[in-house]
Amino acid sequence: MVDQRQVMNFRVRAQQLDRAEGALGDTAVLDIGAQDTGPDGGRWALAIRGVDVAAMPPEDLILLWTVRGAPHLYRRADVGKVAAGVEPFSDADAGKRIYDAAKPLKAAGIGMLAALDEVAAHMRAVVTEPTVKGDVSGRLAEVMPEPYLRFCRPCNSTHLYEMPFRLAAVRAGLELQLDTSPPVLQRIARFRKATSDDRLDLIRAYLRLLGPATPKHVADYLDAPVKDVKARWPEDVIEVVVDGEARSLLAADEQAFDSAEGRATRLLGPYDLFLQAKDRATLVPDTAHAKELWPVLGRPGAVLVDGELVGTWRPRKSGRTFKVTVQPWRTLAASTRNDIVEQAERLAAYRAVPLAGVEFPA
């Protein structure tokens, strides 16, 4: 049996949140993908793990729609293996991942994987040069048959279902241009899907970075059926018990798990991998705090101190400067507040915006 603090410390160490410096090649979160949502997204996740983002050649990263249809950063050198690793495990898995789009396809007798391949083929034909997402969608709506299309009331037009569109992009060999809104898609140069490996295997990566875990935790993270995850569960695992629940840990990580200490203060972005674990009660045992950290809309970031989530933070922009507002969940020592201010200064430097101050409740 292991306690919550041991789990948290292991994840801090496994995700290198206690690291002072590092390079893209040895940054572990890029094995599973760093979600790039919001201004403090994927590259901020790299920065707080010691990567000098300002000095990093931007072409070394690639942005893809992958897990849960969200944009994730990866190493460009890994793109062929990533494309293989993020593929649905089965037709049933593909159907679950594309949500409501599965029903009309099934009614029309179209297989889910076949549907993704069909969308991908048309997407690649459309995107011969960098193209805005809306233009790609409009072109596809002209050539795709009815089971692939839906009427969208907000924009009063007919277009592809969103999830097949997103999940087919990688299959089509398409990436997203960094820092474009609306997104611009372009062909990946010299793209060729390759056989994935253990490092980029999503189940193993989840266990390595967010373990110990159950098949349901991983399935929820991927939006995949538990049955498919169980069928691919690694054999080289050991069992540990967390909060009365049996979970798996990669055997190779047993020593690191037993000895991990997570000494660091970090301002985690709202979609940082550390907060993406599906055992939220382990991350934040207090239900009121959990509701504050994961609201339905408008997520804050989280304050991580020595392996414990101790509060939330939000940026407050005012003119050419911004403030960081911290909402702690317990009384913070003066030294901890100083560490948080230091991290806020780090965030300001990353954003290239002057920091006007850090606000704590009176």
Image: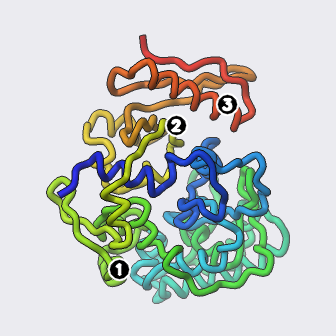
Q: Is residue 140 above or below residue 303?
A: below
x and y percent of residue 128 in the render?
Answer: 83, 75
N-term mark: 3 or 2: 2
Residue indicated by mark 3: 348
Tag 3: residue type? Ala
Tag 2: residue type? Leu
Q: Which residue shows up at 31% across the image and 42% down it? A: 284
Q: CA distance from mark 1 to mark 3?
A: 42 Å
Q: Is residue 149 above or below residue 275?
A: below
Q: CA distance from mark 1 to mark 2?
A: 33 Å
Q: Residue 234: which numbered mark, if any?
A: 1
Q: Which residue shows up at 32% across the image and 24% down it? A: 330
Label 3 Cα neighbours within 10 Å, binned few <14 / some 14-19 / many ≥20: some
Q: Is residue 114 visible?
A: yes
Q: Nearer the viewer, residue 311 or 221?
A: 311
Q: Residue 267: which numbered mark, if any?
A: 2
**Is residue 223 toward the left or the right of residue 352 in the image?**
left
Q: Residue 100: which numbered mark, if any?
A: none
Label 2 Cα neighbours within 10 Å, binned few <14 / some 14-19 / many ≥20: many
